[in-house]
Amino acid sequence: MIFMKKILFLCVLITVGFAASAETLNLEQARALALANSRSLAQYNLAIQNSVRDEKSHLYTMLPSLSADYNASMSYLDRDWGFVDPVDTFNSGVNFAITQKIFEGGKSFIQKAINSIATESVRKEALAEYFNVIDTVDNAYYAALEAAATLEAGESSLQTALTSLAIAEIRHANGIINQGDYLKIQAEKESQENSRNQARRNLALSMTKLKAITGYGEKTELEQVDFSVYEELIQMLADISDEEADALYDRFWKILAAANPSLARAALNSQRAEKNLSIARRDFSPVLSATVFSADIGYSTANGLSNSGGGGISIRGSIPLDFWIMNNKIEKSKNARDSAALDYIGAETALETDLQSALLNAFAYAGSVLSSRRSLDYAEKHFEYIMERYRLSQSSVSDLGEASSLLINSRNNHIKAQYGFLQSLSKLRSLGAIDDEEKLVLLLKSKE
């Protein structure tokens, strides 16, 4: 496991080094950068190390305990309160002992299991954060591409408005159109310029957020997404029937129930609470320990060096009698167990809702991609038709404005649908802890 982690870390470093020197950043490189740049993942790595050390610390408590005591004394008064030479009364000693617990009601083994569960729980938290980082960088990457596409559409709309204004200026100078229509065209041009400026601002903000996540260079450009690879999947999800959608939900739920780190962590917390209750009940058990070796070495001015002790065994036991305290601890542990069980139910319900929401988003966005694409195609043809009639003075300024607005809305809707679909896939991958997108696509396409 540790070896595989080291290999993964080296692969990330290699990818990061390539991405840092490249002028174009693709999605896989952005993910690698985000993972390497994540402080939260670094903190989870430290938390896992500390939890493993806690396991080792408890293991050490189950081993024989070594102890050494030293004492020394001198007196300057005798029993009759007379002064004496302190050197003559010097006395010192050293005690060495080896003690082993031999019975404590099985609490050590239960605590060992609790510590193991705690470590696994932290690992699940780290895995959840891993996919959270990937989902975050995916959304930031797609948001930046969407902002860039929106800016490109805004530039196109502005150029169209400038062309319309140029035609309107000639017609206004020749008295073909009235002042009102001319002012309307000017207003449309200013509106499109303002939209273009807002799109520039949104793109700059999106790139800033992506940079904060990945730490990439200032002049790095983003690689475009090839939407053609998703065409078959989009067609299938857009036309999915209710029965097929239910079957797809069931397949995903089986994966989530086994692999979702948040649900697994809730299950582990429930197990740990049950173990804590068990260990609280064992507080009623007596504790026995045995000293299997003891040696005393002493020195005094009067008697010189002495040695006592040996390999004898002494057994010491204790039985707790403060039952009211232990009963209170047991009741608190029961409450913690019940709370953990409720947390698991809550995590399961939340996960079911998240899965349904993510799948419905995927279905809806897939349908929106197709419908918005058709709408954009019709809007472009309609605008070309109205624009040509406008050049021939057969269409009014209002007709051109309506056609332009329809085209702009259709472009923006298509852009939002495309990147919304990609974000829905990212959410599904994160929920199922699926690190391979091809595996996710195959799962969505599967009929079994």
Image (cartoon, helix red, strand yellow):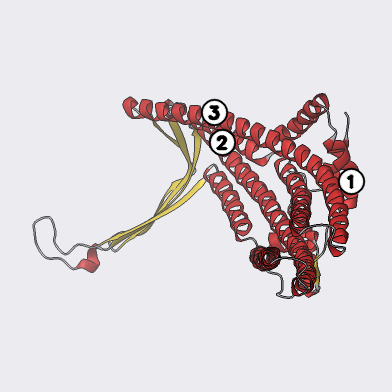
Looking at the picture, does residue 54 appear above or below residue 444? below
Q: Which residue is mark 2?
A: 269
The spot of residue 127 in percent (x, y) is: 67, 47
Contact between labelled residues 1 and 3, with CB atoms less than 8 Å apart: no
In the picture, the quarter occupied by the C terminus is: top right
Say what amino acid the circle numbered 3 marks.
Ala
Q: Residue furthest front?
A: 175
Q: Which residue is mark 1?
A: 231
Q: Is residue 252 left or right of residue 351?
A: right
Q: Which residue is mark 3?
A: 341
Among numbered discs 2 and 1, the one appearing first in the sequence = 1
State the CA–CA distance, disc 3 to disc 1.
43 Å
Among numbered discs 3 and 2, the one appearing first in the sequence = 2
Contact between labelled residues 2 and 3, with CB atoms less than 8 Å apart: no
Say what amino acid the circle numbered 1 marks.
Glu
Dot 1 falls on a residue whose secondary structure is helix
The spot of residue 373 in percent (x, y) is: 84, 48
- Which-is-in-front pick, marks 3 and 1? 1
Q: Residue furthest left?
A: 81
